[in-house]
Image: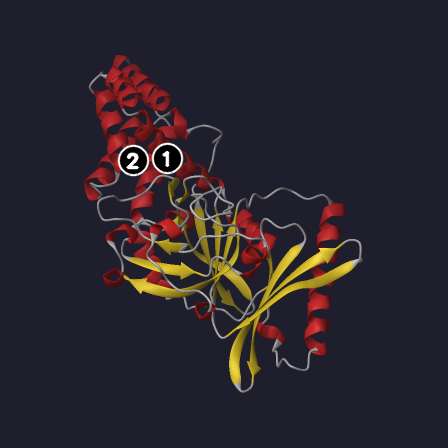
Amino acid sequence: MANRKQVLFQAFRARAVTGYLLVSLGALALPTAVMAESAEKQLLSGFKSIHDYSFNRAMHHIETLAKENPKYQLAQLMKADFLAIKAGKSRWIEEYRKAYPKKVRSLLEEAKVRWQATGLTPQQETEILGQFVLKSSAQPYLVIVNSIAHRLFLYQQSAGSYHEVANYYVSIGRKGAGKQTRGDLKTPVGVYQIVKQLSDRQLPELYGVAALTLNYPNQWDRELGRTGSGIWLHGTPRSTYSRPPMASKGCVVLNNPAMTDLIRRFHLPSETPVIIASSANVKPLNATDEIAMADDKQQVLSRINEWLREQQQYQVDWSKVGVFHYPGEKGMYYVSFPTLMDGKEQMVEQFWKKKTDQNGWQLVLKVQQTSPSQTHSVAYDLASR
């Protein structure tokens, strides 16, 4: 009986020491999709064991994770916590946190956002997709970055609709999302396209194993006077396994195993849409809101379709037209489609906005180019972000 009480006390102490993991958790399940990587599976299994008061099981998961990934600082911190608890030296934990407050705070924040991401059910992930996609495009893949949840969701098109095939933890800009000016350390919010892929041998060590460059600033950003460049999806230096949630100069950063998986398994082509949202929280809608959203969707799709049929200069296949809600802009939609101009295929981007005073949807900006890389050069200058 005494031994059982001791184990329960250790488990209770583990829960108290790692209380940052349990804020607002409740009884959450672990979706299979979230546990795609073995390292993340070990981490989340460790978190769940802590939540369930299974001290020894939690320690096993974290020790295995730390052994297999010796450069993973969060795993090493948690391993040290467990060993201190086991040795009855919990004061060491407090002393370390006082000695390195900034470093520990960033690691605990990573633990928190990784755990909270497990609260997304498959149904909610579908609803997140529904927030942004009115109509799928001709592209085989779609990327949605939820900067609040620090997750990158990858969707593959099949039979005219998207289905989630992977998702990864990501780090964003040190100052959060909503980039406005060069050097503000923020990640942009909007709809972008992949320009090109850069391999390991083409990159400085800072970018890890690979990078996918984006066409920030897009024409809408330029219209609003937003500045900066060099916003990419990329990996991490080999000296570290993972970065804290807000640690980049504006890029969306995956760890190297995730970046390798993304590149090798899916081979994302140029012009793949990338939606970066400052928030993608699912909130239940009442019947009135649902009807209003359905009406808006039908109206904007009908208006775009009508406009395209009126334009004799374009040869457009409606099945290849993509229509996405533009994050960060109320009542605005991003439209893209391929078309033939003078015998050459070109990509057209449009920005449509609801004009309440004119009681309808209006085309407010149009961009025509052969590809995103036509107007966006790739640069390594970190200060340009």
What residue would you read off at disc 2? 74
Q: Position of residue 49 (x, y in %)?
A: 35, 32
Measured along the vertical axis of the image, is residue 122 above or below residue 196? above
Q: Nearer the viewer, residue 124 or 239?
A: 239
Position of residue 4 in the picture relative to residue 118 (left or right): left
Other residues around mark 1 within 10 Å, as few (<14) / some (14–19) / many (≥20): many
Q: Position of residue 160 (x, y in %)?
A: 56, 68
Q: How is the image coloured?
A: secondary structure
Toward which corner of the image does residue 73 lie, by quadrant? top left
Label 1 sits on what residue type? Ala
- Mark nearer the N terminus (2 vs 1): 2
Toward which corner of the image does residue 283 lie, by quadrant? top right
Is there any visible trace of residue 264 in the rendered image?
no
Measured along the vertical axis of the image, is residue 219 above or below residue 3? below
Label 2 sits on what residue type? Leu
Name the element at disc 2. Answer: helix
Give the residue displayed 32% in from the left and 39% down from the top. Answer: 43
Looking at the rendered structure, which numbered label has been put on residue 111? 1
Give the residue displayed 30% in from the left and 27% down from the top. Answer: 55
Position of residue 263 in the picture relative to residue 117 (left or right): left
Q: Nearer the viewer, residue 115 or 103?
A: 103
Determine whether label 2 and label 1 are within 8 Å by CB: yes
Measured along the vertical axis of the image, is residue 130 above or below residue 49? below
Inter-mark Cα distance, 2 to 1: 7 Å
Give the residue displayed 30% in from the left and 32% down from the top. Answer: 58
Give the residue displayed 33% in from the left and 44% down from the top. Answer: 40
Residue sitting farthest toward the bottom: 343
Looking at the rendered structure, which numbered label has been put on residue 312? none
Q: Position of residue 281 (x, y in %)?
A: 56, 43
Name the element at disc 1. Answer: helix
- Quadrant where the N terminus is found in the figure: top left
Give the number of marks.
Answer: 2
